[in-house]
Image (spheres, grey):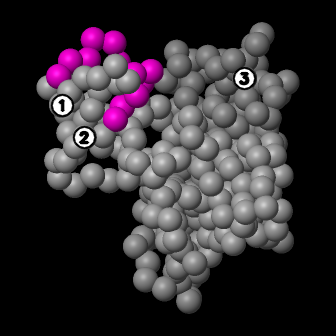
Amino acid sequence: MNIKIGEYNVLKVMKEKPMGVFLDDGDIGILLPKRYVPRGTKIGDELKVFLYHDNDARIIATTEKPLGVLGDIVKLKAVSATDYGAFLNWGIMKDLFIPKSQIHNIIRPNGEYLVKIVIDELTGRLAATERLEQFLSNENLTVKEKDLVTLLIYRRTNIGYEVIINNIHKGLLHYNDVFGDLGIGDKVEGFIKNILPENKIDVAIGKIGYERVESQTEKILRLLKENKGFLPYHDKSSPEEIYTFFGISKKTFKMAIGSLYKERKIEFVKDGIQLL
């Protein structure tokens, strides 16, 4: 049976014991402790569980959901630090260890750090590493222009945010394509804008297509029509509200509604804008 450590597995309940249930792994079984056993579970049921090693290197199951699985790059909060490394909270009872050799500088409790979840070569257990560059390459691209991708904000540069694309490649999100606040470790959906010489990649946030290429005035008119001719947004709305709903900056929004007002396509009413 193919058991995947650090990932979700669907396994059948093979026997019950006072400490929990044992799940069929083709061998003696994997313990799902009693506290994680869903109410009403019986022998023969299939459960979706996450597998990891306990402190005694035994494979154990949980129905808790970690903040990331094997291969993911995630931002995790440090719980404690030792001379040998640090422990990170990744959403399950057992903290994730990051060896000292995989730490860039210093990890302090309550600090948040961008790490990749890996299998430690020495112990064979799940661990974390801050040394992400070894896992990123643009040599052989798995994406093309206009592809929808997941972007993880990696670090700031002078011209934009360096991002990690689909956990594999590096790209650049230019500041003039950003309308809201982004922090290191944030994940957003985007698309491949341009692939440049030497496989350098420019990306943008959002989706390419009709919603992306239409002008901002066309977008506002479309949204008004889709919402019975009224939208509760105006020049006093916060930049965050406007960006969340329209995906544009407040400055762009004000210019667009000003243009629509001059064209007598909308009117300003109490608490919003109305389609004429």
Q: Give the magenta-colored segment's residue range.
A: 31-43
Tell me the CA gap for discs 3 and 1: 57 Å
Residue 243 locus on image (x, y percent): 70, 37
Q: Determine if the magenta segment contains residue 200.
A: no
Earlier along the polypeptide chain: callout 3 or callout 1? 1
Circle number at residue 233: 3
Q: Is residue 125 above or below residue 80?
A: below
Residue 84 locus on image (x, y percent): 73, 63
Q: Kindly state the secondary structure of the residue where label 2 is placed.
A: loop
Earlier along the polypeptide chain: callout 3 or callout 2? 2
* Marks 2,1: beta carbons within 8 A: yes
Residue 30 locus on image (x, y percent): 30, 40
Tell me the CA gap for discs 3 and 2: 57 Å
Circle number at residue 29: 2
Q: Quadrant of the C terminus?
A: top right
Decide if residue 256 is on the left or right side of residue 147: right
